C-alpha cells in the first residue's frame, strides 16, 4: 500500500470525479498550499493562468481521463506556505504522494448511489461501505442541509473521499439544498464542472452517463426563494444542451465500448409531484422525451424524495412517459437522527440489481429490474 | 457623458468590457445585491447555474455584443438584501438604472491606453478623461500595485467604470503585478476573462484585437516568487492558442469589416530585457513570428516599463522582428498632488496612427505620428 497524504496538509484522501473527458482530482487542504498532479509524464496544476492557487476551500486538478486510465496512478504534489505574499513567498513544506487508481473495467460494474445524507455523514459512509466492493460512486446531491457555511460545501467531498480514497472514480451532482444560503454561488470553485456547467456527461469504462440538474424545486418566483434563483433560464440552456447531446450519439452514448447508459438527476423530474413542486411540465416533458427517443438509458437514477422505490415506465408515477425504470433512493429517517439508507446497484447484461442498504449493513429491500428490451 | 445618478448599490459606473463576441458588464456593488441586465427585450443575470450571486465582490453580467451594439442602451436591475439565507430572503430595495451605450462605429476610432497606474487611480482617471472623444479604453494591467487585497483588485473596474461611465466599451489585459498576492488566483471571478483565460480576442466595430499575457516577468523558479507561479506552462498553452487563432482567421482578424488589428500585452515581450527579466526568448520569438507573418497588427500596445515611447520595426529594441510599431505607455510619476500618471491617447486612421501622451492634468507631454507601413 502506498503512503497516505499527510494529514497536516490534506484533511481527507482525494476524490476523483469523472466529468466530460476529464477527471477532476479534488483535495481538501488542511493548510495553505499549492497543488499539482503528475500523470504519466505530464504535470497538471491547480492554477489560474500561471498563478498557483493556495487560497481555496478545495483544490481541483483536471486531468485527461484517458491519461489517468492508462497510467492507473497519479502523484499529488504540494508546497505549503504560512502566508501568501506578493513577493518572497517562503515554502514551509513540500512533498509528493502517489495514489493508485482503478478505472472501471468490469463488464458488470457495481456502484453506490448516495444522496440526501443531509449531514448524516457517518451513516452515509457506513451504508455505502456495507455494499462491499464497488467500481465507482455516484454522489447525487443534498449531502448537507444547506449552504450556510463553507464547511457544508465540503461534506460532499469528505464522503466521496472516505468511500473512494481517490482510488476509484466518483460522479458528482448538485441537489436542490446545495442552492440555498450564501455559499452556493461559489460552487464553481468547489465542485467538478464541465465548462462551468452542473450538467454534463461522463464515461467510466463500459458505463456512459448523463448528469442532469433541475436546480430548485419550486418556481423561481416562489416567496421562499426571495428572488435569488433563476433556474428557469438555466433549464432552458440545459434543454438546448440536451438536444445537442442527442445529436452527438456517436461520440457519447453510442460511442464504441458503451454497454450501459445511465441518466442521473437529484430531482426526480419524471415523477408526478404536488404543488408547488409541479413545475416545468413542458421542459421536463422535453427532457424525458429526449431520453426516451434518443439517449435511451438503462435506468434513471434519482434522489430527493427521501424514499427508496422504483418507478416503472407506464406506472402511475410516470408523468411524461419515461423510457426506463427510475431507481429512487437516499433516505434520512424522519424519526431517527442516525438512520440512513441508499442503493447499491449492480449492472449486468440482463438485469439491474438494486440493494437498498442502511448504515448497519442491513439490506432493506432487493429489487431486480430486467434491462430494457432495446438494450438487451 | 450622461448625467445618470448612481444609487448606493453602485460604487462606480459599470465597466463594459469587450471579450470575444460578448460584453462583460462589471459592477462593483456598494451593498449585498443580486443583479441582472436588460438589453432590448432580453434579460441576462449574474448567476451560477441558476443561483443569483449576492456574495460576490463584483458583479459580472455577460451579454452578446451584437445585441448591445444594436440596442444602444442597457438597464441594470438590482435587488438588495441585508443577509442571504437559505429560505425566505427578504428584499430591502429593488430598482433599475439605464445607461446609454455607444458601440464603436467610427471609421477612425480613438482610444486611451492606460496601464501601470500602480494605485494612482484618480490620476489615471483624470489623464484618460483628458483625452476627449475616445471610442474605447484599453486597461493594460498593473492598475494596482499588487493583488494582496480585494480592494486593489476592484480598483481596475472602478477606474474603467469611472472613465467610460459605462457608455463606451473597454478592454482588459492582465499585468505582472496582478499576479502577486493572495487575490491573484481569484481573478477569474474578478476580471473579464474569456473562459477564465487571460489571453483572448476582442472586436469593437472596425477594430479587432488580440490580448497576449506574458504573465510574470522573471522565471517561475526565481526566489522572489517562492514557487507560487507556473507561468511557463501557461505561456506554452498561450502559444498553442495563438497558433489556433491563425487557423480561425476568417472569423477573427480576417472577418468582414475588420479595418484595424491591434495586439495588446502588458509586457513588451518583443523588446530586450536585462537579467533576470530576459526570459522565454524562444516563446516570445514564436509569438512575434505569428504576429509578423500571420496576424499583421497595425501596432502592438504595451505597458510595464514605466516609460512612454515608440519602438519602430527594425530598430535596436525590435529584437524579434515584430514587423510593426510598438507603442509603449503608462508612467506613474510624482505630480503636482504628489502622485501623477501619463498614458497614451491613440487615434487610428488609414494613413497614420497618432499618439498623444497625456498626463493627469490634461497636459500633452508629447505627440508622435506613425505613418502606416513605416519602418524605423
Image: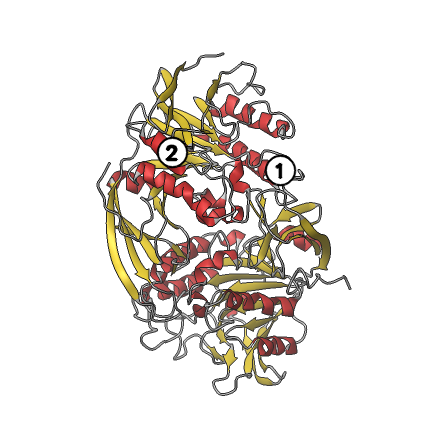
Q: Tell me if residue B56 can be seen.
A: yes
Q: Secondary structure at mark 1?
A: helix
Q: CA distance from mark 2 to mark 1?
A: 34 Å
The reply to whether residue A262 is visible in this rendering is: no
Q: Is residue A220 above or below residue A119?
A: above
Q: Position of residue B315 (x, y in %)?
A: 54, 14
Where, by quadrant of the figure, is residue A318 drawn?
bottom left
- Would residue B31 appear left or right of B270 to someone viewing this image? left
Between B107 and B333, the one lying in front of the other is B333
Q: Is residue A59 above or below residue B184?
A: below
Residue at (62% x, 40% y) in the render? B233
The residue lying at 30 percent from left, 59 percent from top is B79
Judging by the rendered image, the residue that carries numbered circle 2 is B123
Nearest the eye: B188 or A215: B188
Q: Quadrant of the C terminus of chain A?
A: bottom right
Q: Secondary structure at mark 2?
A: helix
Image color mode: secondary structure
Q: Which residue is mark 1?
A: B232
Q: Residues within 10 Å of mark 2 (few under 14, many from 20)?
A: many
Say which label, 2 or 1, has the lower sequence index.
2
Observer-side mark, 2 or 1, equals 2
| Along the line of sight, the residue nearer the viewer: A336 or A285 | A336
Indicate the chain on which mark 1 is placed: B
Horizontal side, residue A254 vs residue A94: left or right: left
Label 1 packing within 10 angstroms: few (<14), some (14-19), many (20+): some
Quarter of the rendering containing residue A69: bottom right
Q: Residue B268 location, x and y as percent?
A: 53, 27
Q: Residue at x 45, y 56 (%)?
A: A246
Amino acid at each position: 500500500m502506498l503512503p497516505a497524504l499527510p494529514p497536516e496538509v490534506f484533511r481527507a484522501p482525494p476524490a476523483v470525479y469523472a466529468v466530460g473527458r476529464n477527471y477532476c482530482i479534488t483535495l481538501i487542504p488542511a493548510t495553505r498550499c499549492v497543488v499539482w498532479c503528475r500523470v504519466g509524464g505530464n504535470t497538471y496544476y491547480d492554477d489560474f493562468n500561471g498563478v498557483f492557487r493556495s487560497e481555496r476551500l478545495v483544490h481541483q486538478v483536471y486531468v485527461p481521463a484517458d491519461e489517468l486510465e492508462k497510467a492507473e496512478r497519479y502523484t499529488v504534489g504540494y508546497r505549503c506556505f504560512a502566508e501568501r505574499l506578493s513577493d518572497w513567498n517562503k515554502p514551509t513544506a513540500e512533498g509528493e504522494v502517489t495514489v493508485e487508481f482503478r478505472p472501471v473495467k468490469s463488464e458488470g460494474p457495481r456502484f453506490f448511489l448516495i444522496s440526501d445524507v443531509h449531514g448524516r455523514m457517518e451513516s452515509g459512509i457506513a451504508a455505502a461501505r456495507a455494499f462491499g466492493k464497488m467500481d465507482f460512486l455516484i454522489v447525487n446531491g443534498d449531502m448537507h442541509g444547506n449552504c450556510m457555511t463553507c464547511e457544508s460545501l465540503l461534506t460532499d467531498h469528505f464522503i466521496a473521499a472516505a468511500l473512494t480514497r481517490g482510488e476509484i472514480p466518483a460522479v458528482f451532482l448538485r441537489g436542490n439544498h446545495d442552492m440555498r444560503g450564501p455559499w452556493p454561488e461559489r460552487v464553481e470553485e468547489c465542485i467538478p464542472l464541465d465548462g462551468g456547467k452542473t450538467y454534463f456527461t461522463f464515461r467510466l469504462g463500459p458505463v456512459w452517463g448523463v448528469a442532469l440538474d433541475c436546480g430548485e424545486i419550486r418556481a423561481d418566483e416562489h416567496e421562499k426563494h426571495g428572488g435569488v434563483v433563476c433556474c428557469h433560464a438555466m433549464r432552458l440552456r440545459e434543454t438546448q444542451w440536451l438536444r445537442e447531446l442527442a445529436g452527438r450519439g456517436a461520440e457519447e452514448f453510442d460511442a464504441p465500448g458503451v454497454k450501459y447508459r445511465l441518466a442521473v438527476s437529484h430531482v426526480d423530474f419524471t415523477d408526478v409531484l404536488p404543488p408547488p413542486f409541479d413545475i416545468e411540465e413542458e421542459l421536463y416533458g422535453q427532457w424525458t422525451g429526449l431520453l426516451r427517443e434518443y439517449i435511451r438509458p438503462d435506468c434513471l437514477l434519482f434522489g430527493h424524495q427521501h424514499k427508496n422505490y422504483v418507478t416503472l415506465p407506464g406506472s402511475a408515477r410516470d408523468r411524461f412517459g419515461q423510457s426506463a425504470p427510475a431507481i429512487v433512493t437516499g433516505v434520512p429517517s424522519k424519526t431517527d437522527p442516525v438512520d440512513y439508507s441508499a442503493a447499491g446497484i449492480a449492472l449486468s447484461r440482463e438485469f439491474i440489481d438494486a440493494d437498498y442498504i442502511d448504515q448497519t449493513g442491513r439490506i432493506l429491500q432487493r429489487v431486480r429490474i430486467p434491462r430494457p428490451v432495446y438494450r438487451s | 457623458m450622461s448625467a445618470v445618478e448612481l444609487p448606493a448599490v453602485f460604487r462606480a459606473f459599470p465597466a463594459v468590457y469587450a471579450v470575444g463576441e460578448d460584453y462583460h458588464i462589471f459592477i462593483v456593488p456598494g451593498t449585498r445585491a443580486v443583479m441582472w441586465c436588460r438589453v432590448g427585450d432580453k434579460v441576462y443575470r449574474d448567476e451560477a447555474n441558476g443561483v443569483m450571486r449576492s456574495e460576490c465582490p463584483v458583479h459580472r453580467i455577460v451579454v452578446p455584443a451584437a445585441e448591445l451594439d444594436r440596442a444602444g442602451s442597457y438597464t441594470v436591475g438590482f435587488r438588495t438584501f441585508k443577509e442571504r439565507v437559505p429560505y425566505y430572503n427578504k428584499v430591502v430595495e429593488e430598482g433599475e438604472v439605464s445607461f446609454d451605450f455607444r458601440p464603436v462605429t467610427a471609421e477612425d476610432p480613438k482610444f486611451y491606453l492606460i496601464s501601470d497606474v500602480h494605485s494612482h487611480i484618480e490620476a489615471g482617471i483624470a489623464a484618460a478623461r483628458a483625452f476627449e472623444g475616445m471610442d474605447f479604453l484599453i486597461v493594460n494591467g498593473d492598475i494596482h500595485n499588487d493583488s494582496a487585497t480585494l480592494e486593489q483588485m476592484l480598483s481596475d473596474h472602478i477606474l474603467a467604470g469611472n472613465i467610460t461611465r459605462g457608455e463606451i466599451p473597454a478592454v482588459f489585459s492582465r499585468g505582472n503585478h496582478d499576479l502577486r498576492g493572495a487575490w491573484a488566483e481569484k481573478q477569474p471571478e474578478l476580471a473579464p476573462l474569456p473562459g477564465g483565460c487571460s489571453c483572448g480576442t476582442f472586436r469593437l466595430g472596425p477594430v479587432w484585437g488580440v490580448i497576449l499575457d506574458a504573465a510574470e516577468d522573471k522565471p517561475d523558479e526565481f526566489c522572489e516568487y517562492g514557487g507560487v507561479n507556473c507561468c511557463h506552462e501557461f505561456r506554452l498553452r498561450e502559444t498553442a492558442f495563438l497558433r489556433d487563432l491563425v487557423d480561425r482567421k476568417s472569423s477573427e482578424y480576417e472577418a468582414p469589416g475588420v479595418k484595424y488589428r491591434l495586439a495588446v500585452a502588458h509586457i513588451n515581450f518583443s523588446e530586450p530585457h536585462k537579467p533576470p527579466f530576459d526570459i522565454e526568448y524562444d516563446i516570445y520569438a514564436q509569438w512575434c513570428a505569428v504576429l509578423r507573418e500571420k496576424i499583421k497588427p497595425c501596432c502592438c500596445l504595451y505597458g510595464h516599463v514605466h516609460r512612454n515611447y515608440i519602438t519602430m520595426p527594425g530598430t535596436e529594441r525590435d529584437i524579434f522582428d515584430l514587423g510593426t510599431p510598438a507603442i509603449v505607455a503608462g508612467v506613474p510619476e510624482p505630480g503636482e498632488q504628489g502622485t501623477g500618471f501619463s498614458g497614451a491617447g491613440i487615434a487610428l486612421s488609414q494613413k497614420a496612427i497618432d499618439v498623444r501622451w497625456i498626463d493627469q492634468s490634461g497636459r500633452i507631454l508629447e505627440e508622435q505620428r506613425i505613418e502606416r507601413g513605416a519602418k524605423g
